[in-house]
Image (tube, rainbow, N blue to C red):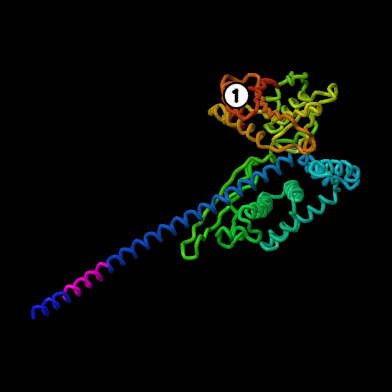
Amino acid sequence: MLHGVRAIKKSKNRIVAINNSKKSSGSVSVEAAISLSVFMLFIFSLAYILKVFYTYNTVQQSLTEVSRNMANLSYFYHLTGAKDFSDRLNEMAEEAETRLEEQKNTIVNAYTSFTGFFSSDNPSVDDLIEATVSVDDLIDSISNTDAEKEDGLMAGLISGAKEELKLFITIIARKLNYEVTNKLVCLMAKHSLKGELSERTKNKDDPALALGIRDGMKGLDFSKSSVFGDSESLEFVVNYTVEPFAFLPALPMSNRVKVIGWTGGRGSSVKESKEPVDSDETGNTSQSYWNQYDDGKMYFDRGLKMEEEYVKTLNPGRGNRFLEFEKQTGIPAIDAYVYNNETGAVEYYDVFTLNPFLKTYSTRPSSITSEIKKHGKRLLECGTPGNLKDKDISKVRRIVVMIVPDNSGEEVDNSFRNAKETLEKYGVEVILYRGFGSYEANDEDLDSAA
């Protein structure tokens, strides 16, 4: 009898234990479900943020590179004299047919000289006419708002750097109204952006779609961009919508890059003949270059002229048959080099001008140091000029030369010393050159120049 009672009690205890175990197991399951949900939410949030950040950063880097390329195109447009050539074309178009025939050689020589700067081929004026007709097709497609035709024409016109440059020059030289020029250059920028994104995403078809951008490349909107709206800068603004994951909300985003170009209302290019200013062998002038060019707001021309004069002093001449001097280096960071055929030593020179009286530098002298360091970094990272690739180079000297007005103050010396101390650690030499006259300007001039 007693044994039976014990058995009943044990059975009840087992039932209670089982019930307690079920309650505990259910509680753990609920806690695990809540914890898993929170963990999954955290993971998806992190993935969302990383995807958005990656997309934004990739587009920003690509747009920066595209903007730099566009600025370089306008730089070559100005530097090589194509701006003068464009002005000649406009003048000649207004003259009689006989006058056009008389000036034919001028056109051919100017255009051939320009294109020869980039290629050994010597195209004719027909190339320019062909490019002009192509631009006409683009303008027609813009007028008809035919987006697919625009994309097709742009892809067909630009198959390389040379074609891109020719198209850019043709667009600017046509002197179209602002809206048309703006859209044409933005089309070029969009086409170039696709190439930059393709390199970064390894997707050749639609890299924007691979980044999660709605509608892919068609979803990139350049309508807020401004091309030479202030006569000197290119501001590219790209708006788009990112869809990181199908079940998460989309996010509108915008990237913006502003760079300085060298076309527009800054006078004629350096290829145009001007009355020379007397100068001696050291580059010192009887008249200040700083003020002569400043009067016409030709700051870019002023810098090029002084750099050109200084580079002349680097030429050892024909007296030393072992030294080889070259200005056409093919590398933007190297203005000239001197190669010693006997020792194999080479000197790379990066020469630039800086006006410390402008607001940019007078209010923040540290920006002078930054500018010197920037040139030093470019010179340090640049490659070997094409003419030297087959040479035996035993030693490389990298030299940055900063040209400032004669009356520049102590802040220039301090900034120069700081930059020199830093760059010398990397094997880059820095030279401070005061020359080409003094700079004098009233506050109004300084504000506008800044």
Q: Residue 404: horizontal and vertical position, in percent? A: 65, 24
Left or right: where 26 falls relative to 327: left
Left or right: where 164 falls relative to 53: right
Classify mark 1: residues with Cα within 10 Å, few (<14), some (14-19) or many (20+).
many
Identify the residue at horizontal 74%, vertical 21% (top origin): 283
Asked if residue 204 is positioned above or below residue 368 in the image, the reply reads: below
- Amino acid type of the residue that numbered disc 1 sits on in the rendered structure: Phe
Residue toward you, 204 or 248: 204
Residue toward you, 263 or 61: 61
Q: Residue 318: horizontal and vertical position, in percent? A: 85, 24
Residue toward you, 36 or 416: 36
**Is residue 299 in view from this perspective?**
yes
Left or right: where 281 falls relative to 404: right
Specify the quadrant of the image occupied by residue 325: top right
- Element assignment for label 1: helix
What residue would you read off at disc 1?
Answer: 416
Which quarter of the rendered picture does the N terminus lie within? bottom left
Instruction: Report the span colored magenta.
Output: 12-24
Identify the residue at horizontal 76%, vertical 41% (top origin): 83
Q: Is residue 18 magenta?
A: yes
Left or right: where 392 falls relative to 70: right
Asked if residue 414 is positioned above or below residue 152 in the image, the reply reads: above
Q: Residue 159: horizontal and vertical position, in percent? A: 75, 54
Identify the residue at horizontal 52%, vertical 58% (top origin): 242
Q: Main secondary structure of the magenta part?
A: helix
Q: Is residue 122 magenta?
A: no
Q: Residue 411: horizontal and vertical position, in percent? A: 56, 22
Which quarter of the rendered picture does the C terminus lie within? top right
**Is residue 91 in view from this perspective?**
no
